[in-house]
Amino acid sequence: MDTIINSNLGKLYLAGNTALDFDDINHTLKYNINTKVNLNRDFLSSYISGIELKRLNTIRILLNGNLENTKYKISTSKISLIKDDIILDTPLNLEGHGSILSGKIDFFGLSLKPDSNIGYGELIVTGDFNFKDFKSTFNHHTNFNLYPNRDYLNSILNEQNITLMETPSLSGKAEGGLSSIDTSLYSNVKFLYQGNILRLALDFPRFYLDFDDLYSEGYISLFIKSPNMEFGFVDNRFSGSLNSLEDITSDGNVYIKKFKGFGVDLNPILPMDINFKIKNRLADFNLSSNRLILLEHLKILMIYH
């Protein structure tokens, strides 16, 4: 079976073979199909608002199996998109298996390797869904490693007197469906701020968000080091609705081991630990320092406008 189909959507080259018994198509239809698709960029661009589809190489589709179990593979060597001043190129590879009869689709090895003027990276996605009820059944697990372009970010950060000294890194994972997502993020960056060279390490092990009511929870740690400074926020936990930021509760610890910079020298009263808890718009601080005696507890009313 060799077929060529032309339409305003593009051109499709279809090659393969099939076998079936017309008395029992659901259980006897077998196929091995190799398809090449050249989509019409102008046609597709009319459905993509604000994004220019600059290039879309030939899409290859392989289908092998039957209506109960089909293996598939979809790939293209390059997709190019333009949004404002951002240019993005990536290949795409996707493979998995599914059942046309039940609607269950598994995908694994969805691979994207974006390369653009704002950075590059890699995303690997696995998941599953049922196309008969996509909204409630879609589920995915995504691992990513991203490396933002230092020069591009510096053109933005220079206004804040911040200069990145090296290419920052972002890595993490995201999983969930269309109703909620659970993510983790890790980052490391070295930068110059007001004459001080600092290294920032961000550890964001969990951020959960429910898309329906915007309820979120998670915890985060942040560490900053330099020859003259070392401090961090450790296991800062939070929970609450993003619809009401003032009612979000949080607690954690701040430690300051050394701090001399930006015209401030705290070393005479260091090291210092600060435990805090924010709830019902009240902030409760508990400070401990071998060199400083303060009130054991300090409560501050959080005022919001």
Image (spheres, rainbow, N blue to C red):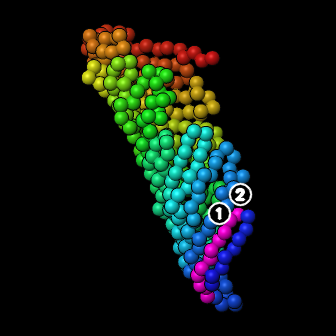
Q: Residue at x 58, y 81 (%)?
A: 16
- The amino acid marked with disc number 1 is Leu
Q: Which residues are the magenta region? A: 9-19
Lateral position of residue 204 relative to residue 97, left or right:
left
Q: Which residue is mark 1?
A: 39
147 or 37, which is in the foreground?
A: 37
- The amino acid marked with disc number 2 is Phe
Q: Mainly helix, strand or loop, the magenta region? A: strand
In magenta segment, residue 10: yes
Q: Which mark is residue 43?
A: 2
**Residue 85 locus on image (x, y percent):** 57, 39
Displayed quadrant of residue 265 = top left
Q: Residues within 10 Å of mark 2 (few under 14, many from 20)?
A: few
**Residue 148 locus on image (x, y percent):** 44, 40
Where is 180 relative to 278, above or below? below
Q: Residue at x 59, y 58 (%)?
A: 56
Where is 50 relative to 202, above or below? below
30 or 103, which is in the foreground?
A: 30
Q: Residues within 10 Å of mark 1 (few under 14, many from 20)?
A: some
Displayed quadrant of residue 291 = top left
108 or 217, which is in the foreground?
A: 108
Secondary element under disc 2, as helix, strand or loop, is: helix
Residue 70 is at least partly visible in this image: no
**Residue 305 locus on image (x, y percent):** 63, 17
Q: How far apart are labels 2 and 1 at the CA level?
A: 8 Å
Lateral position of residue 91 relative to residue 190, left or right:
right
Q: Residue at x 68, y 52 (%)?
A: 45
**Residue 49 locus on image (x, y percent):** 69, 46
Quarter occupied by the N terminus: bottom right
Contact flag, marks 2 and 1 (Cβ < 8 Å): yes
Secondary element under disc 1, as helix, strand or loop, is: strand
